Image: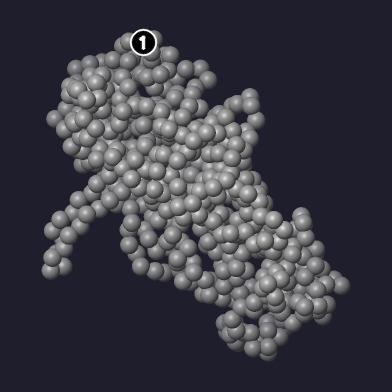
Amino acid sequence: MRKFLPVFIVAGLFFSCQREEADAPFATDTDISVLPNTETKASNDGLLGWVALTGQTHISAEEAQETALATAMQMREVEGIVTKAPLKIGSIEVVKGDTRKPYVPTKGNAKPEQADVYIVNFANNQGYVITSADRRVPGVLAYNSYGHLGDTISNPGQAILFSYMQEYIEEQRADFEANKEKLATQEEENLFKILPKKQQEKLIAKGLFNEEGKRLKSKYHYYDEHNPRQIPEGGFNSHEEYWKWFCDDPRNFGREFQDEGYAAYDKWYMGYVKPPLLKTLWGQSGRYNDKVSKYCDADGDQSPVGCVATAVGQLLAYHKKPAIFKGRTMHWEDMTKIDSGDMFSNMRSNSILNNPTATEDIQYLLAHLGDGDLLAMNYGCRADGGSGSSRALEALQKLEYNVHTEDYERNNVLNEIEKDRPVYVEGCLNKTERKFLGIRYYLKYSDCHAWVIDGYADQRKRTIIYYVFSCSADDVTTSYEGYKEESNEFFHHNFGWGGSPTGFSYGIGTGWYNIILLGHQRGHSRTFKSPNTNFKYNNKIITVNK
């Protein structure tokens, strides 16, 4: 059994993407002049330079809580969720490596331990947020509007993304540490460029920069690392306040340009959003598989329909085509009808439960998608023969869809979602490869899953940076106020894993995940160069246009 971020991933499920339909188990509940404002585009790379310059990597639990609440409220608005009860924090857990424990505030001036992420669960099973505890790995990594993240994951699609999350955290930290001196130097050189010429000449005379503006001396370390500076409670509201606080301390004279700076974080806000396109929340068993031909004596049920059939079936239901499938008329409107007040439609919806024709249409569709001329499913009990993207592509073409397959790439997926076209996606946890004489002769992917990406959200936050250049009133420019913008981009995933149509059960059939997780290549960073090794396997997509 594999464990990630103190969450157990049930390994046995990955012989196949099939499952028994059931809720997953969860845990319980002087005149100062300032330069004109400078602003960067929405990118986390600029913030990494500031982190390298200051060494401030820790994200407090208080900031994480604010981020989690802001994310949840904004995402609930995106999804159209209206609740009478206010959203409250149920628990905050700190994750470091294989350790997951409740958050306990540090006492006095004790330096908090650097953690990996915070898991913020909301009360009354109203969802959770996984957000970074480390500025070297900025961002909200995952959000769900329902459920409660416990210690076991049975959903293979979710498990794949969790494993990618772990790789991403480790890789980003390692690359940052390998490049932090370069990042810090670049940040200082950028600050030097915006100074008046007279002040640049002073810094050159001190031997801090050369005539070309290149940094010559390494960053000054704070005067007493055992007695670090204590920022006043409440921080600073302006560069004037910060300048006065900094320059009132005589120990700071002579090191102004080497100031650590101060960052004031603004509130998160939403940029471009595309709410989830799929309105179905279908699964693989629990009435969905009633018309599958193979019966499993040990399970007392038919074989699950398979993740590929569920993903393709939900795409057909979204596009409502073909009108007649395998000789049976499909009543698409009835098959996808959403009960009043619900988020999704599925076999638990009253509109479906009380409509035998719609129920049988769904069962017939999912069973016969597995026929030999379409997905050619090799049904088994708990494990099928698999049906990769090539079979999904062939099946969709036979059903007269205009389809195209390619490797996963963020821009291509977003382009489809912007055009109201959900995207079929698959990924695998493991790859087995053998070589002889430099020739690859055996390659096998395993622990795979297929699902649908159908939504997008861009969340942003502005950071105001205060920086002291000089404590001398003779200098034209004494302080700096600049802006950087942090961005979280999310794709919404429908895992084909069932769940409650209300969205507030223990089901984990959908969720929002940071787009960097899927298809991210190890070391392939916009900020620095390092080896480019893909640690996510066989990430393919199929774009579908009826």
Q: Position of residue 444 (x, y in %)?
A: 20, 51
Q: Which residue is mark 1?
A: 355
Depth check: give the residue in front, 150 or 459.
150
Give the vertical position of 14 relative to 363 (above or below): below
Q: From this viewpoint, is residue 374 visible?
A: no
Amino acid bearing label 1: Asn
Q: Can you say which quadrant of the picture contains the N terminus?
A: top left
Q: Residue at x 80, y 74 (%)?
A: 249
Q: Can you say which quadrant of the picture contains the C terminus?
A: top left
Which residue is most to the right?
A: 30
From the viewer's perspective, is 507 left or right of 488? Answer: left
Q: Residue at x 35, y 67 (%)?
A: 531
Q: From this viewpoint, is residue 385 visible?
A: yes
Q: Callout 1: 10 Å neighbours few (<14), some, many (20+)? A: few
Q: Position of residue 448 (x, y in %)?
A: 28, 43
Q: Residue at x 24, y 40 (%)?
A: 15
Depth check: give the residue in front, 248 or 148.
148
Depth check: give the residue in front, 274 or 514.
514
Q: What is the image's colouring?
A: one colour
**Count of marks overlaid on the render:** 1
**Quadrant of the rendered structure where residue 209 is?**
bottom right
Q: Residue at x 64, y 27 (%)?
A: 85
From the viewer's perspective, is 251 left or right of 136? Answer: right
**Quadrant of the rendered structure where residue 394 is?**
top left
Q: Position of residue 386 (x, y in %)?
A: 21, 38
Give the vertical position of 455 relative to 197 (above or below): above
Depth check: give the residue in front, 128 or 213.
128
Give the vertical position of 239 relative to 538 (above or below): below
Q: Secondary structure at mark 1?
A: loop
Give the vertical position of 181 relative to 430 (above or below): below
Q: Position of residue 126 (x, y in %)?
A: 55, 32
